[in-house]
Image (cartoon, rainbow, N blue to C red):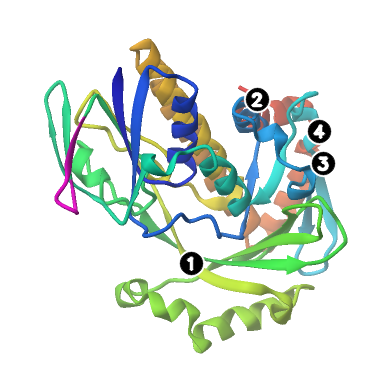
């Protein structure tokens, strides 16, 4: 029996544990730095068809439909006048059993954790160091140690474990953007809507069929090192007033109508870290952090975890190497979207709108730009 340690109890780590539940040749333990399960995160996530297929294999299709939403379009608008530019028909990427899905992150986390025995998760502990030969000896912050055949590092964008196992320590960098995330109640437009403006865009989409919506706005804003390190500043009155002024000036959605508002600096990866050891893998944001403008973070976390299991089960790293190439492919699309959504030069805005109107009607373009990510 192979023994596997999973560092991090987020989407990628919990999904990986669910796979192992269905394969009795593996024993596992999850190590989570938080003191309690993090299943109360109410903000939204989007899942494309590839990840839904994988989730359905472990019972996701049994979640009540009222807790999910199935947008059929992505609509693009000019922020300054709310004029619709174009749309993407998401139905073309679906099949009879699997649909593009939006939901609350907490809904997914609760589903993933429900089949994990309590004895399989250890909370309030972090990886301290690793000794590796053929067997991995992992030492933890509570002075415990454990031997594993494989170690899976999935403890987030600002992972401390990555530095212990990576050959090339690559920290995600602040990309001079802030995300304002919030919940919103409304009863119109159950598709995904993207409003694009100079140095600022926002996205609204449903997270269930109870008129709960996710709101996320991305603002360009430089911060000093001291501001980045001062986490209290993001929820300060002066800081929030900056976002309130922008939203109330340019958006039909007013700041006062948002609930559970939080501001986060956006960190992104530029390179993929390479593990020092053949039997240690990284997944999720610990492996690579994308700009949020292609909505692939959760899907890639799930798909990468699945590929890692296939590698371990088949004693081959081929699928993981293919996944790394796909991650880079997702990354350049995310960066291109970020640029397009926030261009400020009038000529570039005209060109963007012109291209959106034409390219988003082309099946050839959509199959290349989106289909390669959602369906391959």
| Helix, strand or loop status at disc 2 | loop
| Helix, strand or loop status at disc 4 | helix
| Residue 326 showing in the rendered view | no
Cα separation, mark 4 vs mark 1, equals 32 Å
Residue matched to label 4: 91
Point out residue 206 in the picture as x, y percentages from the top left corner.
Answer: 76, 54
Residue 231 sits inside the magenta stretch: no
Residue shown at 48% from the left, 56% from the top? 38
Q: Quadrant of the N terminus?
A: top left
Which numbered disc flags the more N-terminal residue, 3 or 2?
Answer: 3
State the extent of the magenta-drawn residues as a range.
140-147
Examine the rendered structure and indicate whether residue 347 appears above or below residue 319: below
Q: Are marks 3 and 4 in contact (CB under 8 Å)?
A: yes
Q: Residues within 10 Å of mark 4 (few under 14, many from 20)?
A: few
Which numbered disc flags the more N-terminal residue, 1 or 2?
Answer: 1
In this image, 65 relative to 247: left or right?
right
Cα separation, mark 3 vs mark 2, equals 16 Å
Q: Can you tell which mark lies on residue 72?
A: 3
For the residue pair 43 and 242, the one nearer the viewer reads as 43
Which residue lies most toward the right here? Answer: 188
Q: Can you tell which mark lies on residue 264?
A: 1
Residue matched to label 2: 375
Q: Residues within 10 Å of mark 2 (few under 14, many from 20)?
A: some
Which numbered disc flags the more N-terminal residue, 3 or 4?
Answer: 3
Examine the rendered structure and indicate whether residue 374 appears above or below residue 357: above
């Amino acid at each position: 029996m192979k023994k596997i340690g999973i560092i991090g109890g987020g989407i990628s780590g919990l999904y990986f544990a669910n796979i192992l539940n269905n394969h009795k040749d593996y024993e596992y333990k999850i190590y989570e730095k938080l003191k309690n399960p993090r299943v109360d995160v109410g903000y939204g996530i989007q899942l494309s068809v590839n990840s839904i297929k994988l989730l359905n294999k472990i019972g996701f299709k049994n979640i009540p439909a009222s807790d999910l939403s199935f947008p059929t379009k992505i609509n693009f608008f000019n922020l300054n006048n709310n004029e619709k530019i174009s749309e993407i028909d998401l139905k073309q990427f679906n099949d009879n059993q699997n649909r593009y899905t939006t939901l609350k992150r907490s809904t997914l986390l609760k589903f993933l954790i429900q089949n994990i025995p309590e004895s399989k998760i250890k909370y309030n502990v972090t990886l301290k160091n690793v000794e590796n030969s053929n067997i991995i000896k992992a030492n933890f912050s509570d002075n415990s140690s454990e031997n594993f055949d494989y170690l899976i590092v999935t403890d987030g964008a600002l992972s401390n474990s990555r530095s212990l196992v990576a050959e090339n320590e690559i920290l995600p960098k602040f990309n001079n953007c802030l995300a304002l995330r919030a919940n919103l109640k409304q009863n119109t437009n159950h598709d995904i809507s993207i409003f694009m403006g100079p140095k600022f865009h926002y996205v609204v989409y449903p997270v269930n069929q109870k008129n709960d919506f996710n709101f996320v706005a991305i603002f360009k804003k430089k911060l000093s090192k001291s501001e980045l390190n001062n986490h209290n500043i993001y929820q300060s009155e002066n800081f929030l007033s900056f976002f309130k002024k922008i939203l109330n000036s340019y958006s039909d959605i007013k700041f006062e109508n948002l609930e559970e508002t939080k501001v986060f600096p956006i960190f992104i990866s530029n390179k993929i870290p390479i593990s020092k050891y053949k039997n240690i893998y990284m997944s999720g944001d610990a492996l690579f952090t994308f700009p949020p403008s292609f909505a692939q973070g959760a899907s890639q976390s799930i798909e990468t975890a699945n590929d890692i299991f296939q590698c371990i089960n088949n004693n081959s790293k081929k699928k993981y190497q293919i996944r790394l190439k796909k991650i880079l492919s997702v990354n350049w699309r995310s960066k291109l979207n970020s640029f397009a959504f926030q261009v400020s030069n009038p000529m570039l805005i005209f060109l963007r709108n012109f291209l959106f109107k034409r390219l988003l009607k082309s099946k050839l373009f959509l199959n290349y730009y989106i289909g390669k990510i959602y369906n391959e």
